[in-house]
Amino acid sequence: MHLAQLNVAHLRAPLDSPELADFVDLLEPINKLSDAAPGFVWRLKESEDPRETVSHGYGDHLVINFSVWASRDELWNFVYRSAHLPVLQRRREWFLRVAEPYSVMWWIPEGHIPSLAEGMERLELLRREGPGPAAFTFKDFYAPEGVPASGGPSDAGSEAASLPAAAEVRK
Amino acid sequence: MVAALHDPVRRAVYEYVISQGRDVGRNEAAEAVGVQRTLAAFHLDKLVEAGLLESGFKRLGEKTGPGSGRPAKVYRRAPGEWQVSVPARDYRTLALVLAEAVDLLGGEDRAEEAARRAGGRIAERVAPDESLEETLRQRGYEPYAQEGRLRLRNCPFHVLAEAQPLLVCSMNLSLCRGLLEGLGQDPERARLDPRPGECCVSLSINNEN
C-alpha cells in the first residue's frame, strides 16, 4: 500500500503579491527536494514547471499539495527531517492559521493515483468525523489494515521507568 | 536496565556503539574499548538482552558472494528510550499536554522566546573553561563534527519532537541560540539542519555561519 497525503494552506495574500515572493521562490527547490526524496512516489503537478502551484476549483486563496509516498516514515522524513522543515517553520509569514485540520492522509493501492476530488473528500471526512482508517493524520495515524497504530508518543506510558516507546512510534 | 550499564567495560562498549550512529561489529567494538573479542561479544549481547542495543547480521568488509563468509553479528542503538526517576515523576505526559496547548493557542512565538531564555539560563551554569561540544554532550545532544559543523546525533526532546515537530524543533533551535548568546557567542552559529534520525539543529564549529 502507498500513503496519499493532501494538505491545503490558506494564503495571506495573492500568490503574485510581494508578501508571497519568498514562498514562490522556494517552490522550485522544495519541489525538487520532494521529488528526489526517498519514498516519493507521485505529486500532483500543474505542469513540468516546478514553480507552478496546482490550479483547482476550491478557491484562489488555497494552495494545495497532493502527493503519494511509499511509507509513513519516508513522508515524515521529508516533511520534518529535510530542508523542507525550515521552510515549513516560516508558514505563518505566508499562510493563515486555521482551526480545522488542513492535512489528511489515507492508504491507497500501489499504482493508483487518486483524484484531487477524492483527496478533498478525505479532508472533509477528517474534518467531519475526526481521524479514522479512511482519513487520518501523523498524530492519529492508522496502519494500512485499518488498525490504529499504537504509536502516538502520547501512548508512551507514564511509568517512571517506561518501556521503549519510540519503537512503536517509528513505524 | 540501569544495572546493565554499571559495569565499566559494558558501559564503554555501549557508549562506543551509540557514538558511531551505525552498525558496529564485535571486532570493532573490542578494539575500540581495548578488550578481547569474546568479552566484547559478551557485553554486547548483554546490552541487547537489556534492550539497550539491538543486533542484526550483516556482511562486513569488501568481499561479497561465495567465499565472503557468513554475515557478522552487528549492533546498533535500540530505538526505544528509558527514563528512570525515583521517586516516580512523569514530566513527559505533562510536557506533551503543554506542547499541544501551545500549538492550539498559536503560541509558538512566545514558546520560542521562553526557550531562548531557558538556553540563557543553562549558559549561566556552564563552567567557564568548558567547550561548547562538552556542554552539548552534557545536555544529551551527542555532538560530532562533520564537514565543518557540529552535528547532534541525539534529540533530547525526541518524544515531544515526534508529537509536535514544528513547535519543538523551533523551540530547540531557540534554546541552542539562547545558550550560545549566554556564552557570549554568535547565536546564528546554530541553525535548523534536520536529518532523519538526528537532532534538527547543527552548529558551525568556528564562529562562522
Image (cartoon, rainbow, N blue to C red):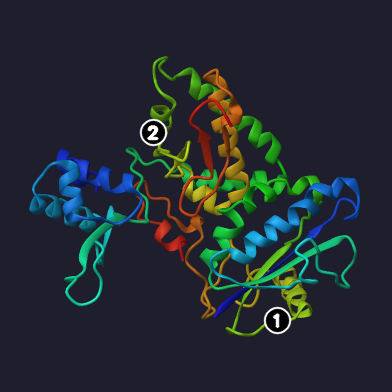
Image disc number at residue B137: 2
**Residue toward you, A121 or A113:** A113
**Residue toward you, B164 or A56:** A56
Instruction: Give the CA distance from mark 1 to mark 2.
Output: 47 Å
Residue at the farthest top position: B128
Residue A30: which quarter of the image? Answer: bottom right
* Residue depicted at x 55% and y 17%: B184
Crowding around mark 1 (Cα neighbors within 10 Å: few <14, some 14 to 19, many 20+) is some
Q: Which residue is mark 1?
A: A114
- The amino acid at mark 1 is Pro
* Residue depicted at x 76% and y 60%: A100
Image position, residue A118 (x, y; %): 75, 80
Q: Is residue A87 above or below residue B208?
A: below
Image position, residue B14 (x, y; %): 24, 46
Asked whether residue B7 is in view, the answer is no
* A147 with respect to A95 (left or right): left
Residue A117: which quarter of the image? Answer: bottom right
- Give the letter of the chain under mark 1: A
* A72 with respect to B66 (left or right): right
Q: Is residue B145 above or below residue A161?
A: above
- The amino acid at mark 2 is Arg
Secondary structure under tag 2 reads helix
- Give the letter of the chain under mark 2: B
* Residue depicted at x 32% and y 44%: B19
Image position, residue A72 (x, y; %): 54, 67
Image position, residue A164 (x, y; %): 36, 56
Secondary structure under tag 1 reads loop
Asked whether residue B75 is in view, the answer is yes
Crowding around mark 2 (Cα neighbors within 10 Å: few <14, some 14 to 19, many 20+) is some
**Same chain shared by disc 1 and disc 2:** no
**Residue toward you, A155 or B156:** B156
* A8 with respect to B18 (left or right): right
